[in-house]
Amino acid sequence: MSPTAPNDLSHVVEQLRRRDAYAHPVDRVKVLQTHISYVLLAGDYAYKLKKPVDFGFLDFRTLDQRRHFCLSEVELNSRLSPEMYLGVEPIVRAGTHVHMGGEGEVVEYAVKMRRLPSEQMLDARLAAGRVSTADIERLARKMERFHRAAPSDPSVSRFGAPAEIARDWAENFDQSRPFIGMTHSAAQHRLCLEFVRSSLVRRHSLLLARMRHHRIREGHGDLRTSAVCFDTMCPDGICVFDCIEFNRRFRCCDVASEIAFLAMDLELHDRPDLSDAFVDTYVEASHDTGVRRLLPFYGCYRAYVRGKVDGFRLDQSESSPHERAEALLQSRKAFELACGYADEDRPPLLVLMSGLSATGKTTLAQALARLRVFDVLASDRLRRELSGLDTHAPQVAAYGAGLYSKERRQRVYQELHRRAAEALSDGRSVILDATHGERAQREEAASLAREHGAYFFVIECRADESAVRHRMDARERVHSVSDARFDTYLQQRSHFDPLDELDDWSHIVVDTSASLDVSTARVLHALDERLTPRGLATGPRLDTARRREAPDLRG
C-alpha cells in the first residue's frame, strides 16, 4: 500500500530549523526522518513530529489524530524510559513564524524528549565496535523485567492467536507486493509466504499454549538497535524508547516476537554472536524455552517487516537520493535475512513424481533420495504389497484392468497418502513415486501437504518417445517392478490430466531424456532456487544457517 498524505509538514519543519523557534538555547537544529516522522534535534532536547500519512496500519492524517498519538507515545514510553519523555509540545504560528510552544495558532504537535547522546545509541556503538556481550545481557534482563510486568489480560492475549498472526502476515504480503523486483524477488516473497503457511500449521498448538501461559504481553513493539541507548539518564543505564503507539496490535505480541526483533537487528548489524547472547540471556532469565522454538518464525516476520518499511521510504519524495539508495540496500538485506530465518526451520517436503510410464520418475526419485533426506514411497511396489504378490513377478494386464483397475489404483493412492502423512507428522520429507495422472490425485496430495505444514512440489518428468521406447524394451529384458509397456504409455498419454492447476513455484518440469546426473542436477537446482532464493542485492550472501539446533531437512 502506498501512503496517502493530505498535507505536507515540510514547510513547518523548515521553519523549525531556526534557532529562535525554541524557548531554550539552540546552537543548530538537525533534522532526521523516518517514513512516519520527523525528529528535530535542538539543543538539549529532541522533538518528534508525526507525518500526516496513512499506511493502513497507522493513520496520522488529521491534527487531532497526531495529537492523540503524541500523548499515547509519551504515556507508553514512560514505562521503559520515564526520564526521557517530557510531554507533548504544541507548535504554534505567530504572525509569519512558527515556534515550538508559546502563544499562537496551534498548527502541529510534537513529542518533547531529552536528547540522548547519538554516540551511545546501540546502532552507533555497534558500528564503532563498542558493544560487549555484557551490555547485551543487561539489555536482555531489562526486557525480561519489563515483559514480566507488562499487561497480559485477555484483550492483550488475543493478539497472539494464530488467526491474528495470519492477519498481520497477510497485511505484510499485500503491502510488500508492489516492491517485488525492487526490494526483494518474487521467489523470496513466495518462500516467506509458504514458510508462514507452514509455521502456522506446525506451530499452531505452541502458539495457543503461549496464549494460555500469558506469553502475550503489551510490550514495546519496535525493539530495534536504534531504539536503545546506553546512558546514565536511566537508572539502570539503558534507555529503551520509541515504542509503537499508533497500533495496539503491533505492540501486543508474543514476547518471542519482541526478542526476535532485536535478535534480528543484531544479525543485520553482522553480530550473530550478540544476537545469540541476547536470546540466551533472556531465555535464562525468563525460563521461557519457547522463545528459541519460535525464533525463526518471528525472526522471519521481523526481518520481513523491516524490509517492507525500508521499502516504503523509496516512495517518499522528501527522502534524498542517498537516503533512498541506503533504504534500498537495507531493505534487500532484510528480505535476504527473512529467507535465512525461513531456512533455519524448514518444514518437511512432500514431493510428487508425475509423468507417463518410462519417463524416468522412479530412477530420478531414487537419485534424489540418495542425495537428500527423503523417504520414497513407490506406487509400483505398494500395489504388489497390497495384493500380496511377489515384487518381481510379472503381472501384465490391459490398461485399467487387474492390478490397474480404477478401484485398485484408488486404494494404492489412499495408502500412499496415509503413509506420507505418517512421515510428514514425524517431520520427514517424502517423495511419492507414482504417475499422478489425475488432477484429483494431485490435489489430494496438495491438501495433505497443507494439513501437515509441508512444502509441496510436483516434479513432472518428460521424455521423448524414442527414449520411452528404449526404456520399455530394456524392461522386458530384466526383472522390473513396473508392469507398464509401450501400449500402457500410449493409453496414459490419452488420459493424462494436464498439470495446469499448479503454479510456477510448485511445478518443476524436467526432461529426463538427458543423463540421470543432468536431470538430477536440474531438479536440485530448481528446488534450491525455491527454498534458498537469492536476493536482488549484490555482495556476499547472508549466512544464517549456522544457528543451533536447526534440523537438517534439506530437500
Image: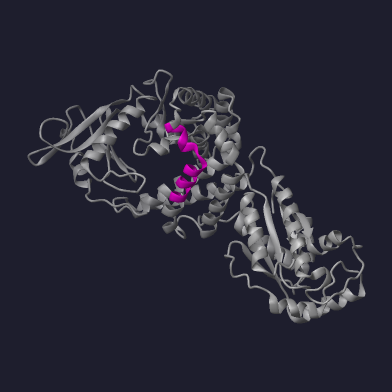
Task: Look at the picture and state if 468 lies above or below 315.
Answer: below
Residue 541 in view (yes/no): no
Most foreground residue, 302 or 246: 246
Q: How far from the left and from the top, in percent, is residue 251?
A: 42, 35
Q: How far from the left and from the top, in percent, is residue 91?
A: 18, 35
Q: Residue furthest front?
A: 407
Image quadrant where residue 416 sits: bottom right
Task: Look at the picture and state if 278 lies above or below 246.
Answer: above
Q: How far from the left and from the top, in percent, is residue 370?
A: 79, 56
Task: Look at the picture and state if 549 lies above or below 412.
Answer: above
Image quadrant where residue 502 sits: bottom right
Magenta span of residues: 155-172
Looking at the image, residue 193 sits to the left or right of residue 75; the answer is right
Q: Residue at x 48, y 22 (%)?
A: 145
Most foreground residue, 81 or 442: 442
Residue 259 in view (yes/no): yes
Looking at the image, residue 175 sits to the left or right of residue 396; the answer is left
Total marks in image: 0
Q: Residue at x 52, y 39 (%)?
A: 264
Q: Residue furthest left?
A: 95
Most foreground residue, 419 or 467: 419
- How are the colours assigned in the image? one colour
User: Magenta segment: does it hold 170?
Assistant: yes
The C terminus: image quadrant? bottom right
Most foreground residue, 285 or 456: 456
User: Magenta segment: does it hold 119?
Assistant: no
Q: Residue at x 55, y 48 (%)?
A: 196
Looking at the image, residue 437 sits to the left or right of residue 541; the answer is right
Q: Taken as a whole, is the magenta stretch helix, strand or loop?
A: helix
The N terminus: image quadrant? bottom left
Q: How far from the left and from the top, in percent, is residue 201?
A: 59, 46
